[in-house]
Image (spheres, rainbow, N blue to C red):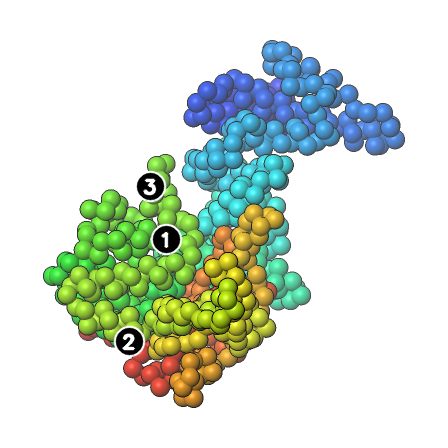
């Protein structure tokens, strides 16, 4: 009864409505709303639903086929409140349980049913901020509203917020706690007494016992323990335990207050903490840090030379990844740097300061979920396209070195990543004379369509195709003119669905090889020289077109068969590369999105995956 808005009076044994101020669900914070009306409506909806359930239950018991009189109850309920029943409470307004339940969801969020999707999003975020303990109930309501409206905008928003904020519905929470035989915590904030926090050590012990007793439920138990850990505030520790079986050596509360330093290991690369939706940024920065000429050139930039703020920030990151003390396992990218890179502002002016470009300065705290989010906050919480980020990053590097007057490094680093192709278009003129036009193109990465095998994708990319060219049919052929030492291939997984008017992602498995030869794609006579490339990095994406999670796998050539997995703050050794990286991972862990190959003859010069020097 307390959940539906009533308190028990022990003096007379009756339940009474909670005061209006408790029931208005923050209506006072919404301009143009009537607190009294919201309080009345909340009580009405709950009591009406209760009355319907009782009536229908009794009719079923008595096998009574007559319809329920939906107007009988409301008049009585509103007379108790001393107000006249509103016109909206008429029988033609109702469709079984759908309408009153839907009105309840709007009431819970604190808004009317005619508000726009955009206002609903803002109200939802405000409720999460004001009443975080009720976040599952707010999520339940927004999902129901999105379904009733058939709103793709709301559905996409919900998916992104669930990924970013790690939200779960009340059903998911109840199922998770119940499966682990734990008491379900209060799902709402009304008179909820604080519950004792479940220690991470105890949760691991409970999971182990349940898994031992019911091994056939192991997948469900793993999912449940992740949900519980998220609610308790130490999901990173539990994810580490589930992935590696390892636990911090000291199970103290301090071990779980933050994620930065989980089990430091000087034989493992440093991780990058995620304080937004920055998994793709973290993954690509880790990749660039393994490119030896780029890393060395950036680390040599003088700290006193402020002509390129971008390179100075990048130097700080590369130095943290290379020289952090032994007790550190992860560092954080400077927030202002992340905002600047994602906005592309520094790319427009490599010498400008962050302040000159209206970039928010770095605060001591990374808490940026306040009531007035900035444009920078939005950038940090929206998943960006990896390809576009690579374009911006390389442009910043080139402009940064040129701003320092270092054209040599700018040219040398560009040559590492950029290749050239030649497009030939063959056609016949009006007079029937064969003619051809050629165009040279520079590329940072090749974009190939999906196929069963990477070789098939490359063959299709370089095969002649018929195109419309200057209002006539023509045959277009692409051939390689120059290949860079670092060859990046993007698998075209995301395309626009014209019927649904949305971007959709294909999770089709594409088999790729450890080594590939590319000489057949060159123009003669260069197609006679062998060119072998070896896989260096695989960027995986898990999720859909508009949201999800990136992780990157990078090979350590110093040890045969050794790969590292970079998953934000956690960097681990891959136990089974053949299955985890080269196998079909689309069902359990996402799929390959970008593939990075390195010229086999240049491996020693170009890449150095694990570089960490502990300064004494």
Residue 393 at x, y = what percent?
Answer: 31, 61
Give the mark, 3 or 1, whose residue is nearer the N terminus: 1
Residue at figure coordinates x 23%, y 69% from the top left: 410
Q: Nearer the viewer, mark 3 or mark 1?
A: 3
Say what secondary structure mark 3 lies in.
loop
Is the residue marked by circle 1 packed among few (<14), some (14-19), or many (20+) residues within 10 Å? some
Say what secondary structure mark 2 lies in.
helix
In the picture, the quarter occupied by the N terminus is top right
**In the rendered view, does 404 fall on the left or right side of 178?**
left
Is the residue marked by circle 3 packed among few (<14), some (14-19), or many (20+) residues within 10 Å? few
Say what secondary structure mark 1 lies in.
loop
Residue at figure coordinates x 83%, y 32% from the top left: 60
Check if mark 2's residue and mark 1's residue have beta carbons within 8 Å.
no
Q: Relative to the observer, which residue lies in front, 279 or 510? A: 510
Q: Relative to the observer, which residue lies in front, 174 or 353? A: 353
Q: Relative to the observer, which residue lies in front, 41 or 342? A: 342
Q: Is residue 41 visible?
A: yes
Residue at figure coordinates x 26%, y 67% from the top left: 318
According to the picture, the residue beneath numbered tag 3 turns out to be 374
According to the picture, the residue beneath numbered tag 2 turns out to be 292
Q: Quadrant of residue 583?
A: bottom right
Q: Nearer the viewer, mark 2 or mark 1?
A: 2
Residue 491 at x, y = what percent?
Answer: 49, 66
Label 2, label 1: how far apart the Cα atoms are: 27 Å
Residue 290 at x, y = what percent?
Answer: 33, 73
Give the mark, 2 or 3, whose residue is nearer the N terminus: 2
Give the mark, 2 or 1, whose residue is nearer the N terminus: 1
- Whether residue 189 is situated above or below residue 480 in the rendered picture: above
According to the picture, the residue beneath numbered tag 1 turns out to be 275
């Amino acid at each position: 009864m307390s959940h539906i808005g009533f308190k028990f009076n022990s003096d007379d044994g009756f339940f009474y409505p909670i005061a209006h101020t408790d029931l208005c669900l923050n209506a006072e914070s919404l301009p143009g709303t009537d607190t009294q009306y919201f309080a009345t409506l909340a009580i009405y909806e709950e009591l009406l639903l209760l009355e319907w359930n009782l009536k229908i239950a009794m009719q079923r018991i008595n096998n009574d086929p007559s319809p329920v009189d939906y107007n009988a109850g409301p008049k009585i309920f509103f007379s108790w409140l001393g107000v006249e029943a509103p016109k909206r409470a008429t029988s033609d307004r109702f469709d079984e349980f759908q309408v009153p339940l839907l009105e309840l969801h709007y009431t819970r969020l604190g808004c009317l049913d005619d508000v726009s999707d955009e206002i609903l999003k803002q109200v939802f975020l405000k409720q999460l901020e004001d009443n975080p303990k009720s976040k599952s109930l707010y999520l339940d309501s927004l999902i129901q509203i999105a379904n009733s409206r058939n709103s793709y905008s709301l559905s996409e928003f919900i998916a992104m917020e669930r990924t970013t904020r790690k939200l779960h519905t009340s059903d998911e929470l109840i199922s998770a706690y119940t499966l682990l035989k734990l008491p379900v915590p209060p799902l709402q904030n009304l008179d909820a007494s604080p519950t004792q926090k479940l220690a991470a050590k105890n949760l691991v012990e409970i999971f182990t016992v349940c898994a031992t007793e019911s091994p056939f439920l192991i997948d469900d138990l793993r999912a449940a323990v992740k949900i519980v850990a998220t609610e308790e505030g130490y999901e990173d520790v539990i994810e580490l335990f589930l992935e590696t079986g390892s636990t911090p050596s000291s199970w103290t509360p301090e071990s779980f207050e933050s994620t930065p330093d989980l089990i430091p290991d000087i034989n493992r690369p440093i991780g990058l903490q995620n304080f937004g939706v920055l998994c793709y940024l973290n993954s690509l920065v880790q990749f660039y840090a393994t490119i030896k000429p780029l890393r060395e050139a950036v680390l040599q930039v003088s700290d006193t030379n402020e002509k390129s703020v971008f390179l100075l920030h990048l130097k700080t990151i590369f130095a943290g990844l290379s020289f952090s003390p032994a007790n550190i396992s992860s560092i954080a990218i400077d927030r202002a740097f992340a905002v600047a890179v994602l906005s592309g502002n520094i790319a427009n002016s490599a010498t400008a300061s962050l302040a000159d470009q209206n970039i928010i300065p770095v605060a001591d705290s990374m808490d940026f979920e306040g009531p007035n989010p900035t444009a920078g906050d939005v950038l940090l919480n929206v998943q960006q396209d990896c390809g576009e980020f690579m374009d911006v990053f390389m442009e910043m590097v080139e402009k940064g070195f040129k701003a320092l007057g270092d054209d040599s490094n700018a040219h040398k680093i560009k040559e590492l990543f950029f290749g050239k192709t030649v497009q030939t278009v063959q056609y016949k003129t009006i007079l029937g004379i064969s003619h051809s036009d050629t165009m040279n193109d520079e590329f940072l990465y090749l974009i190939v369509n999906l196929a069963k095998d990477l070789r098939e994708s490359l063959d299709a990319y370089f095969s002649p195709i018929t195109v419309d060219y200057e209002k006539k049919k023509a045959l277009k052929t692409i051939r390689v003119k120059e290949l860079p030492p670092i060859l990046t291939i993007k698998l075209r997984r995301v395309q626009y669905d014209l019927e649904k008017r949305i971007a959709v992602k294909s999770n089709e498995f594409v088999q790729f090889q450890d080594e590939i030869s590319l000489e057949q794609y060159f123009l003669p006579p260069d197609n006679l020289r062998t060119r072998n490339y070896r896989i260096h990095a695989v960027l995986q994406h898990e999720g859909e077109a508009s949201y999800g999670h990136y992780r990157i796998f990078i090979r350590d050539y110093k040890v045969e068969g050794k790969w590292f997995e970079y998953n934000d703050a956690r960097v681990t050794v891959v136990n089974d590369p053949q299955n985890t990286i080269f196998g079909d991972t689309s069902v359990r862990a996402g799929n390959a999105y970008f593939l990075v190959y390195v010229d086999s003859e240049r491996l020693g010069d170009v890449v150095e995956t694990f570089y960490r020097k502990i300064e004494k």
